[in-house]
Amino acid sequence: MRRNYNPYLLPTCLRKIRFYCKAIIIPICCFQLIRLLIVPTTGDFLLLVVLVGIAFAFHKDFI
């Protein structure tokens, strides 16, 4: 049986890191999307996919 995720059980420093990462991931995704539209490469596309996955995980509280 899976336990519910509670971010308040994390140490204070990890909660702060999680908060700042959650706040900065969307601007990084936007920058990467603009870069991908200007100079499309496979590496940029894969990086954007990973960043969007991380942003989705933060949004749904998987991380």
Image (cartoon, grey):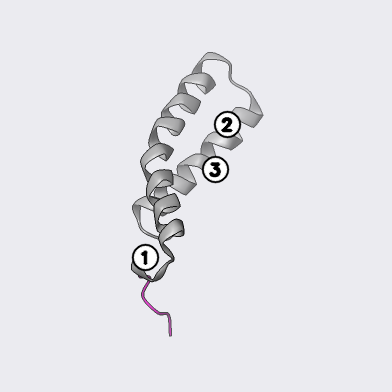
SS of the residue under disc 2: helix
**Camera-nearest residue between 13 and 50:** 13
Residue type at the position of mark 1: Pro
Label at residue 28: none
> Where's residue 31, x and y in %?
46, 25
Residue 7 versus residue 54 in the image, above or below: below
Q: Nearer the viewer, residue 58 or 46?
A: 58
Note whether 59 is above or below 9 in the view shown.
above
> On the picture, is 4 further left or further right than 33?
left
Q: Name the residue under label 1.
A: 7
SS at mark 3 in the image: helix
SS for dot 1: helix
Q: Which residue is drawn at 48% across and 47% down?
A: 53
The residues bearing labels 2 and 1 have C-alpha atoms spaced at a distance of 31 Å
Kindly identify which residue carries mark 3: 50
Q: In which quarter of the image is the N terminus?
A: bottom left
* Residue annotated with mark 2: 45
- Specify the segment rendered in magenta: 1-7
Q: Where on the picture, by quarter, is residue 28?
A: top left
